[in-house]
Image (cartoon, rainbow, N blue to C red):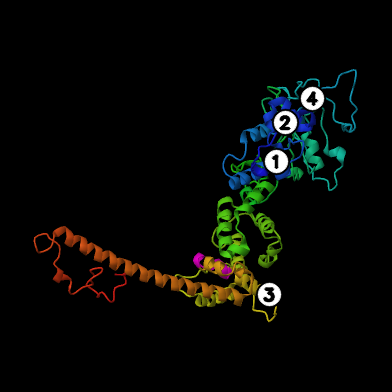
Amino acid sequence: MGKSNSKPWTVPEKSKLKGCAKIMCEKHGDKTCQQLPLWVKTFGFPENGSFSVRRIRLLQEELEDYEKKKGYGSVDWKEFRMWKQEAELRQGWQEKGRKKAPRKSSPSHPQKDLAPLPAPAPHPPVDPRREVRGQPTPAERTPPGRRSAPSPHPSAEDVLVGEQTTHATYKTINEPHLRESGAGVSKALTLDSEATRSPTTNGIKSIEGRDLRETGAGEMEVYRAWTQDSGTRRSQTTPVFRTGDGPNPRDIGAGAMEVYRPSSLQKTHNAIQIVQVPYAYGVWTPDEMRSFAKELPDVTKRGGAAFVKILSLIVQEFKPSLREIQSLLIHKLLLKFSKVKGNWLERDAPYDWTPGAGYRKHVEELYERIETAFPVRLKAICCKKQPDETVDNYLIRLTEVFEDNSGLVPAADPNMSLYESMLIYYFLQGLDEQIKDQAFKHSPFWETGRLSSVRAHAVHAEETLRVLEDKRKQDRVRLEERFMKVLIQLLQAENGWRNGGRGPSRGSRRHGCWNCGDLSHWKRDCDQSG
């Protein structure tokens, strides 16, 4: 018959399948649902299956643990990979559908514009002698713009001055209006050294540094644009360029390009300085945080020293910030984090292991607090009875170690206390198997009593084993003596006697036993019956 867990799972009937399970059976065959009842019953997987990538990953971790316990071959990974492949394929379809660009509206069904653009501000009339792109003719020179102090409160109409192009994606700002308005946010197409539009630019929007200093622009946002040459569209995740004096992007862990406005001391270039960080810092995801927390040992069982050893490896290898270290410890220690929190910095700090750095000093103090708050509490388990040690001496030594590391004290309660029950547990864990087997022969329930009763049974079993061992040694010595005598007699018979090979004469036995021939005793002392 076998056990219930050893029987193979049968495939459910197709008529009863619904949802994802029915899709898998129709698309990949009946074998894909063979282990579905096991997943549902053991791991809590949905009854009709699921195409959620998150559920599939959780199921994979549980199946790996299950295979380690049950042995190799207990999990059909081929079926699981088909489910995982189908889930990832469907997720890819969904993401592709989200990133799909909207279709153009037909003339017969125009779309309603919920947020109409504001009307453009008035601007000077266009000179018919100029080119279509706005470039001045060689005969005409651009008059210098009149500079004025920025207004304290510019209006929206003064700031957003531009013209609309065919695709409604380019926004240009007239340079004189920009300097006169003092806009905080400026948006313009790429300008060359003469403050004119370049026809070969790739759509990046910028403005000269001198114009930024004159207008007081604090931030410039770059949106996606159409390239003028090929007409291709930039990615939707175009980074934001920031202007202004600030710290080094490598110190703050910037993930995108940071643009800084040149200060008054930097006279070499009038253009904006663009600094791109090659190895950008990324924040830990929740999955990464859980995986790191699994690597940390149990601080209550292994102690703070073992915990700090693994935590230091994570800090040196992955270089987390102080806020990420705090999140990792809270996830692992839960309420015990209050014991080691100390004076935690409210402001986050990036990784900096240089001598004397605030980050390094704060982390090293955290290591010391963890080692102090969680000392090693498992020396009692390592305490075993030595071969040449008696049961009483072992119990005395175990009691001292248990009281030093457990934090418990003996109670005067006549009933069994937690101290006594834990001490009995560690006492039985450290005893020899021979003593426990001998005590079990005398009393099968000897482990369920009080400490005095358990000790008495162990001492009695130890004495019994000692008596048996002494008797066994005596029997071994007696057996060795008899073997030696038989060996001597065989050697004498092989070499023959002194009278020419005939047997011994009658007088040769005068000094030995008449029955067995042993020279060590007489006949009256012989154990064998005559």
Marks 4 and 2: which is nearer the front?
2
> Mark 1 or mark 3, which is nearer the start of the sequence?
1
Residue toward you, 514 or 37: 514
Q: Position of residue 527 (x, y in %)?
A: 32, 72
Residue 467 against residue 218 in the figure, above or below: below
Check residue 167 in the rendering and tell me which mark sits there, or answer none.
Answer: 4
Q: Which residue is mark 3?
A: 417
- Contact, mark 3 vs mark 2 (Cβ under 8 Å): no
Q: Which residue is mark 2?
A: 90
**Cα gap from disc 1 to disc 4, whole angstroms:** 54 Å
Magenta stretch, main secondary structure, is helix
Q: Position of residue 403 (x, y in %)?
A: 59, 76
Most distant residue in the front direction: 530
Marks 4 and 3: which is nearer the front?
3
> Mark 2 or mark 3, which is nearer the start of the sequence?
2
Mark 3 element type: loop
Amino acid type, residue under disc 1 in the picture: Trp
Mark 4 surroundings: few (<14), some (14-19) or many (≥20) residues within 10 A = few
> Mark 2 or mark 4, which is nearer the start of the sequence?
2
Residue 63 against residue 330 in the figure, above or below: above
Residue toward you, 185 or 161: 185
**Cα gap from disc 4 to disc 2, whole angstroms:** 34 Å
- Contact, mark 1 vs mark 4 (Cβ under 8 Å): no
Q: Which residue is mark 1?
A: 39
Residue toward you, 84 or 178: 84
> Mark 3 or mark 4, which is nearer the start of the sequence?
4
Q: Position of residue 516 (x, y in %)?
A: 25, 68
Amino acid type, residue under disc 3 in the picture: Ser
Marks 2 and 1: which is nearer the front?
1
Q: Which residues are magenta?
A: 426-434
**Cα gap from disc 3 to disc 1, whole angstroms:** 43 Å
